[in-house]
């Protein structure tokens, strides 16, 4: 069991009372101080070496990233089905990019929609389409992925009656719901690092991703990842 000055540390309250993190502002769910403590307490008494990393994307960086990402055409077929090039949503250069706390990245941009029906492909335009990109951690049988989901939130299409806007948005979102941008960070970051012949009888470091969490604040998007580290020995 973990101890400090002879006192056991069996809970987060014990950790907070005895170890005393530097700043109370960091003692929050999904922040490194508290989550590191949670990981250590959970590992005791079967203690294991744990590493904690945070990747931070500031809003300014996301704005620059969206300049590269847009404009883009999104085909609105259901993923897994045949690509229907008569149904697409074209997102133009963003006029506004902002992080929405606990939600995701909100993008406002001009757009054009083509929705082929009965051999016809009518197009409608919108001056300010609001799209939300929502990052979510997805737990799989063998690890975790960071998935990005797209959803249209607001639109006023030229040439359509106002009451039709909601119906069109629902149809677009039904197609977008079948599409995600996944990153299997467990597969990417789980590594076996050979140590060569320098340390006898040590052979390698095994680094395994345990879990990840996303934190979305007005100023930054943060991905926090916890790793388990083992030393492989030849003896």
Image (cartoon, helix red, strand yellow):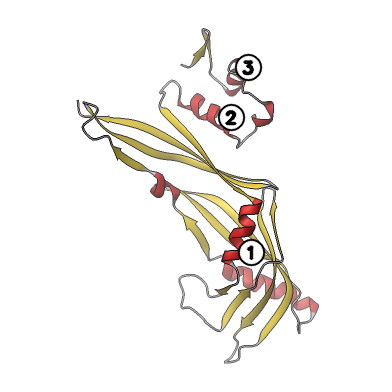
Which residue sits furthest bottom?
119
Q: Residue at x 55, y 43 (%)?
A: 213
Side of 227 where 218 appears, left or right: right
Give the CA separation, mark 1 to mark 2: 33 Å
Give 123 or 191, whichever is nearer the viewer: 191
- Answer whether labels 1 and 2 touch (C-beta < 8 Å): no
Task: Report x, y in % for residue 197.
Answer: 21, 32
Assign a secondary structure to mark 1: strand
Q: Which residue is mark 2?
A: 33
91 lies above or below 1 = below
Residue 190 horizontal/vertical position (percent): 38, 43
Of helix, strand and loop, which one carries label 3? helix
Residue 151's tag is 1
Report the residue at 37% width, 37% height from top: 207
Residue shown at 52%/82% (left/top)?
85
Residue at disc 2, secondary structure? helix
Rendered image: mark on residue 17: 3
1 or 2: tag closer to the N-terminus: 2
Q: Residues within 10 Å of mark 2 (few under 14, many from 20)?
A: many
- Could you tell me residue 193's position as x and y percent? 31, 39
> Which of the 4 quarters of the picture holds residue 194?
top left
**Relative depth, front residue between 137 and 232:** 232
């Amino acid at each position: 069991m973990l101890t400090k000055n002879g006192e056991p540390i069996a809970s987060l309250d014990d950790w907070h009372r005895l170890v005393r993190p530097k700043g109370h502002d960091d003692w929050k769910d999904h922040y490194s101080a508290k989550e590191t403590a949670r990981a250590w307490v959970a590992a005791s008494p079967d203690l294991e070496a744990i590493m904690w990393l945070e990747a931070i994307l500031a809003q300014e960086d996301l704005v620059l990233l969206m300049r590269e990402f847009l404009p883009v055409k999104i085909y609105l077929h259901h993923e897994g089905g045949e690509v229907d090039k008569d149904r697409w949503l074209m997102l133009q250069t963003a006029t506004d990019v902002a992080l929405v706390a606990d939600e995701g990245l909100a993008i406002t941009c001009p757009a054009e929609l083509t929705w082929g029906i009965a051999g016809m492909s009518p197009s409608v335009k919108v001056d300010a389409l609001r799209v939300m990109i929502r990052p979510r951690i997805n737990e799989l049988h063998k690890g975790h992925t960071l998935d990005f989901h797209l959803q249209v939130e607001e639109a006023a299409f030229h040439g359509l009656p106002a009451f039709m806007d909601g119906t069109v948005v629902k149809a677009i979102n039904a197609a977008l719901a079948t599409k995600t941008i996944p990153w299997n960070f467990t597969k990417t970051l789980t590594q076996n690092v050979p140590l060569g012949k320098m340390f006898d009888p040590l052979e390698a470091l095994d680094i395994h991703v345990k879990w990840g969490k996303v934190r979305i604040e007005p100023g930054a998007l943060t991905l926090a990842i916890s790793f388990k580290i083992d030393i492989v020995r030849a003896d």
